[in-house]
Structures are given as structure tokens and as C-alpha cells.
Image (spheres, rainbow, N blue to C red):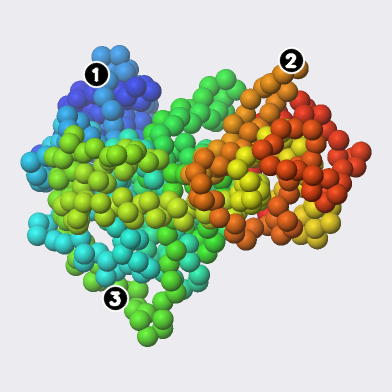
Amino acid sequence: MLTEIGACGELFHTATGTAYADLLVDGHRETSPIRSKRFRGWLRRRYYQATGDAASAAEIRSALDLLEARAQFDGPERVVHVRIAEQAGHIYLDLADEHWRAVDIGPDGWGVIGCPPVRFRRPAGMLPLPVPQQGGSIESLNSFLNLASRDDFVLIVAWLLATLRSGGPYPLLAISGEQGSAKTVLSKLLKALIDPNAAPVRSLSREERELMIAAKNGYLLAFDNLSGLPVWLSDALYRLASGGSFAVRQLYSDDEEVLFEAARPILLNGIEEVISRPDLGDRAIFLTLAPIDEVQRLPESELWREFEIARPRILGALLDAAVHGLRTLGRVRLDRLPRMADFALWATACETALWPAGTFARAYGANRRTAIEGMIDADPVAACVREIMAVRSSWTGSAAELWRADAYRSRHDLLSERTGWPKNPRALAGRLRRAQTFLRALGIDIAFSREGRAGSRIIRIRATQENIVSTVSSVCDQPAPRPAGDVCDDDSRSDLVGRYPMGPACVTTADDADGADANAGLHFG
């Protein structure tokens, strides 16, 4: 009897074999994993309503086993989403209310529907969104945000619109500012617009398994009050924002893995700019908040009360822009595709519903230029390369020669332990590879090759655009280190021999030194 009760809705499974059931509750459809506590409780309640008795634990287990088998072997395969889904050119936003309604967003408009063609699940902690309202203006959102410029507001709106797309890739939003600049409040406000949760912001994950669980049970991930990112977490966030797979060993098992594949929008905040690795920084939007004067500060309870009143219309304005984006996306053409091209195309398609064409491109370009400067200044290798190329047009040599050129200065630099200069040429080559993209944006091109009969590894650095590289303050406080040795160079190098003497301890063969280890850790002092 329990089996017949449980089979009253459709049974299906996901690509990973997880069994689900569509339940008919009070006239609407709900979707739940068969092995979840919620489905188990629903089964007990239905049995009690039908018999007036309680089902035994053995009967519950037997019914769950049979229903799971039916879902896995006889049921269709479906995709189950969290908060956002896309199908047939439409976007579906789960309101997560008691009636399991969703917003259907299409090229012709948006509306609230009761039975979407996609399936959603409701992880613990997920809170409902308000029913969006027509006639709102996105400008009303700006009054709740402590942003430094109009460009920052344009980028915030573009990032929110990006979170309405399923599957990513998503730009990572990195917010920094001193104490009292409302970083946490801003993070909570943005999350409340798209994916409200009982725990809106969280601390850093301690391991990849924790990050995977957080991504599986939530849509928009907001990490609060960070002071730095471990290398492994930076790499994991990169994969998660761009869409990647995670595999961890299943608990109490030696040879089985738990697989998770998804893309999630991510928000970080901290007093310092915590993103230091170029690969993650290349996918980020950086915002710096100004401190709030005491005379301008509001009680947080009053801020949230006003925001809850405005939230339905703000959400409606975002949905209006998304409708416009779906209508115009196929006609959008950019003269030059930037990094995060899908995000740029979508934001450009939506922007004319909010402000003049080109507004987003100007704000995004300015933000990227500022981010590139900051990332290069934070990396002593990139900063030194930029300083070297400020006084010459090209440089050719091995990583060993480039590393030895700085060795003399490092031994006489009291801050050398904190500058983060690589300890050997191989690590230097790996750091150069990581900095390639940002340096190229400043007109410095780095190429790696093998030459000669011995196949010696050679690095060629060239200024690709005249006058694009400017000398700025960096950790290299000595005159530009210019390697000595018998290598080809377009500029005179006689002045280097006396300035940076080479000792026997510095000798490293070029072939051993220039390994260009792509997995070399990037650590900043």
C-alpha cells in the first residue's frame, strides 16, 4: 500500500542516478528526492491519512527501495535545478513559495506560473522570493547601496542580470572596503534579490567537499569578511564560477566518488582585495566601497524595512531587463569580445532597457583596467617585468638569466622575504605564464619557445604597443633589473654586468631553470 501511495506522482531520475518523485500536494506539484526526509515524512502522512495507523520502519524502507528502483529503471531522466533554470529560450525563476510557483521569463514578457515545465528542488534554508511587480525602476536599488560611482552601479546590475542565466559562466563579484563601509549589508541585499537564504552569507569553506555541498544546496554563494584565499580555494572558485566538475571520495567508501557538476554565481567581500591569482582575477568584477559617515548611517532594521517594500518592484525591473535581453541577444554584436564574452554579450543585450547603449562596455572596460593594474602591482614578477619593459622594447633570454638578474638585488633587499619573489627560475617561469594575460593587456607580450640543437627554453618579452607601458611604483625599488649573459637583446646591456654581479651560487642551467611549471603556486607577499 505504501508503494501505491508513493507512486501517485511521476517518478524519475537525474543523470547521476538520484531518484525523484513529483508529489501532488494541495493541487500543486512538488518535487522531492525519494531518499529525502521530506519525502519520507510525506509518505508517512499519506499512509496515516489512508489507514489511521503508523507505518513501521521496515515498511517505509521497503517502499523507498521499490520506489527508488522504479524511478531509476522505469522513470525518465530529467534535470533538477536550484532557483534558476532555462529551457526552450525561456528562463524560470523559482519563487520557492508554498505553492511552488515560478516566474516564466521569455522574449515576450514575464509572468508567475504554477506548474513550470522544469523541475526545482528546495534545499534546506532556501527562502521565498516576493512576487515581482510591474512598473518598478532599477534606480530605486541604488538608494540602498553604498557605491562609489555610477559605473559601480551599472556593474552591480549587470552582475545581477548574469545571475538570472542558468549554467554560467558567471563573473565573480569581489567587494572590498574598510570597516563600516557596509560590505556585508551589500552582500545580503544582492543575495536577497535573487536567492534569499536563512544563512545569506557564510565563512570560507575549509575543504573542497564543503564548497561542493554549499554549491549543491544553494544557488548564489556569498562569502563574508575574507582576509585571503588559499590556492586550492581560488582554483575551486574559478571552476565553480565558470562551470566545472568536482569529485570527492564518498564517505565510508574506498573506491567510490561523489560527482557534482555545476556553475554558480559567487560573491566575496573583505577589507582587502582577496583575489591575487590572475586566472580568478580575470573573471572578477572588483568594487571598493567608501566608508559611511555617521550622519548618513541608518539603523539596519530601517534599511531592511524599506528594502522589503521596494524589493518586488526592483525584482520586476530586473525581469523587465532580462526580457529585453532575451529579445535582443541574437542581434548583439561586439567589435571586440572581452574576457567573459558570454557575460558581456548578455549585459549588452539587456542594457538598452535600462540606460544608453555602451554604458556597460565603458564601465566594464574601466573596471578591468583598474583590476589589471592592481593584479600586476600585487605580483612582484609581473611588476618587475613591466618595469623592465618601461625602458626597452624587447628582451630575450632564459628564466635563469631573468631570475639571476634579480638575485643580487634580492640579497641586499631587507624586504625580500616579503616581496614574494620566486625562489628559483622554474617557479619564475610558472609565474610568468600566469601573468601573461594581464601583461598582454598592458601591451607586453611574453612567448615561450625551445631553440637550438639542445632545445634550450627561451623567453621572449616584447612591447607590442608603443607608449602603452608606464613606469609605476612596484616592489622593484632598484633600477630596472636587466639580465646579463650572452643572450640576444635589442638594447645595450653593458651596464648590467657591474650592477648585478653573478656569483657561483646563482648559476643555474637554462634548461633546468625554465621549466615553466604551470602548477607552480602563486604566492604574494
Residue 148, given in percent of the width and then of the height, sits at 38, 68
Q: Is residue 64 positioned above or below 339 on the image?
A: above
Q: Secondary structure at mark 1?
A: loop
Residue 489, given in percent of the width and then of the height, sits at 69, 36
- Decide: few, some or many residues near mark 1? Use Cα within 10 Å; few <14, some 14-19, many ≥20: few
Residues under numbered marks 1 and 3 in contact, where contact means CB atoms less than 8 Å apart: no
Query: Can you identify the residue that label 1 sits on?
Result: 76
Instruction: Measure how far apart labels 3 and 2 are at the Cα level.
Output: 74 Å
Residue toward you, 378 or 447? 447
Q: Nearer the viewer, mark 1 or mark 3?
A: 3
Q: Residue at x 25, y 29 (%)?
A: 21
Indicate which disc, 3 or 2, sits on the residue closer to the N terminus: 3
- Mark 1 residue type: Pro
Residue 455, given in percent of the width and then of the height, sits at 71, 19
- Mark 2 residue type: Arg
- Decide: few, some or many residues near mark 2? Use Cα within 10 Å; few <14, some 14-19, many ≥20: few
Q: Nearer the viewer, mark 2 or mark 1?
A: 2
Q: Is residue 509 positioned above or below 335 on the image?
A: above
Residue 78, given in percent of the width and then of the height, sits at 26, 24
Residue toward you, 476 or 283? 476
Instruction: Measure how far apart labels 1 and 3 are at the Cα level.
Output: 49 Å
- Mark 3 residue type: Glu
Query: Can you identify the residue that label 3 sits on?
Result: 302
Query: Can you identify the residue that label 2 sits on?
Result: 453
